[in-house]
Image (tube, coloured by chain):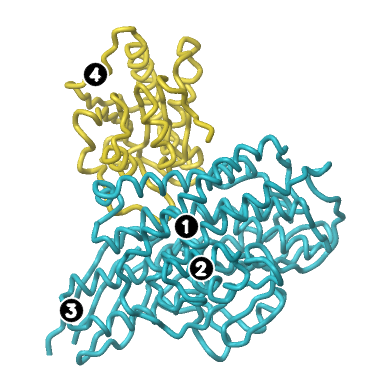
Chain colours: A cyan, B yellow
Amino acid sequence: MATRTIRVDLIARVEGESALDLQIQDGQVRWARLNIFEPPRLFEALLRGRRYDEAPDITARICGICPIAYQMGAVHAMEQALGLQVGDPWRALRRLIYCGEWIESHALHIVMLHAPDFLGYADAIQMAHDHSDMVQTGLALKKTGNEIMRTLGGREIHPVNVKVGGFYRVPSRAELDPLAEHLKRAHEAGIKILRWASGFEFPEFDRDYEFVAMRHPTEYPINEGRIVSSRGIDIAVADYDTEFEERHSEHSTALQSVIKGRGSYLVGPMARYSLNFARLPASVQALAREAGLDDACRNPFKSILVRGVEVIYACQEALRLIEAYEPPAMPGIPMALRAGVGNGCTEAPRGICYHRYEIDARGIILNARIVPPTSQNQLSIEEDLCEMATRYIDAPEDVLRDRCEQTIRNYDPCISCSTHFLKLAVHRT
Amino acid sequence: MSSDVPKGRLLVIGIGNADRADDAIGLLVASRVRADPALEDTHVITRAGDILALIDEWAQSHAVILIDAAAPLSRPGHVHRIDVMVRGLPHELSLSGCASTHAFGVAETIGLARTLGKLPACFIIYAVEGACFAPGAAMTPAVIAAAETVSQSVLRELRDLMRPNSNDTLNSTSDRDFRIASG
């Protein structure tokens, strides 16, 4: 019996450290395991004993590209625990800074990390030789996202201006007006990038995911709403534990999330889009259809198009929010401390990010729980890999390896967030 | 879009994390350079690592000097001066294809800027070998000692670049690789 092993010591363009083992027996894929060996980061333990108002800035440190997702999950949960209702204009400002995070994160992934897969380049640097214009367009788009983050958050990485009850400082109209000019150009850049990406060749690879995302009565979900799924889940954020659970797997330092009684599910742009297409403006829907997307997208390779649609939406939404902005007299609302439990869930660029905190009457954190998107997508990634490896089982090993790497990059995974790179070993017996 | 660097100016970039021991060397040198009152045309900035957003600023700059910590090669405090326009990046720094979803490092960003034609006429890197990058740990004495030497070298280069007839080719054929005496 011959055994062949393919090993990839470094999977590029993925954040964090992990490895992939593929077990192939008698010509069939037996299993795929995403072995996450990045050391646990223990943020939840770190939060215990800290003050409620430290949570947004501590949790922002979990991730360099989606700190807003962590800040928002934390402030929403704390506000629920404290019985606070934070309305406009602070709510609108929070949605605006989140648009900035979506724009910068998606722009980076679409152009610099994912597009090279479709065009046959090793990386964006090689791709830039032939696609300089698109790379520069992507960089300009990302810069606009960064500028929103800097203007509202004080700095683009790990912003420091979001607080429980509002903001530490709110911008003047004059500070937001220049952003509007950048966003108009960014909107055009987003359309250009979506049309470019729509010309890529996509493998036929539809999968029957259970999509999970937020849903808001009227808005495309970013910051609030109920948690819904394509198979009937429709719960308040506080009921997260009734439908979802985390499991420990020996091959991973990250917990893996499942839907109780069913198993894997998918969060992120495809889930958001497929469950909320009707909440996109007609102009954005038209651009999505022009790019070849239907009302729902089940082909993970086409997630690049969905991200493109979301970038365009985020630019439009940011422009709308800026136009309507009237600065408040105070940067936040008054509050009083009390003991309580709060839950928060928002749509990070990679999918829903759930937080739960228990605080005492002095505002000290007794317990903290954070479920990042990549933990929730781990099983779906493994199932995609099994399916992909099955389709390419007779392909040369370098082709199989490339397809597996691309399958993982479809998710724009953040391994660091989920503990949480990739070594690929294929064992054939 | 606000730009950090007015056209024609000199740009000094200190890269590092103040809480990761010897990784702070770039920040330390940047603070010393910034404190020199004679360098009015010099813009000094610090970054934690993701410098992709600086590509446009590079294109608008006369010259860029970047200071960063280097992984240990058994010589803590050893300073590598690299003229990117002459030598390119040493193989050891070339990480093309390894960009994470979160950050483009120095090597990737320089590679991309070169491809896009956005490198300035002069681009010098000072890479200081570190020994310890543990969170919260103190910098090693040899690396602290290197900060003073590198600061003086950077200031000397900046003064040369500010001379009216500067041709942006500072010692371009004489990359230096020098060692700071361990403390």
Between discs 1 and 3, the one toward the N terminus: 1
Amino acid found under the numbered disc labelled 1: His
Nearest the eye: B76 or A353: A353
Amino acid found under the numbered disc labelled 3: Ala
Between discs 3 and 2, the one toward the N terminus: 2
Alpha-carbon neighbours of circle 3 within 10 Å: few (<14), some, or many (≥20)?
Answer: few
> Mark 2 and mark 1: span between their CA atoms?
10 Å
> Mark 4 and mark 3: span between their CA atoms?
51 Å
Nearest the eye: A416 or A168: A168
Amino acid found under the numbered disc labelled 4: Thr
Q: Position of residue B80 (x, y in %)?
A: 26, 30
Q: Residue at x 30, y 58 (%)?
A: A116
Name the residue tied to disc 2: A269
Alpha-carbon neighbours of circle 2 within 10 Å: few (<14), some, or many (≥20)?
Answer: many
Q: Are the residues flagged by discs 3 and 2 from a single subunit?
A: yes
| Quadrant in the picture for the C terminus of chain A | bottom left
Q: Is residue B47 visible?
A: yes
Name the residue tied to disc 3: A395
Name the residue tied to disc 4: B169
Quarter of the image holding residue A316? bottom right
Callout 4: residue from which chain?
A: B
Foreground disc of the pair 1, 3 = 1
Q: Are the residues flagged by discs 2 and 4 from a single subunit?
A: no
Name the residue tied to disc 1: A106
Whether residue B121 is situated above or below residue A290 in the rendered picture: above
Between discs 2 and 1, the one toward the N terminus: 1
Query: Dot 4 lies on which element?
Result: loop
> Mark 1 and mark 3: span between their CA atoms?
31 Å
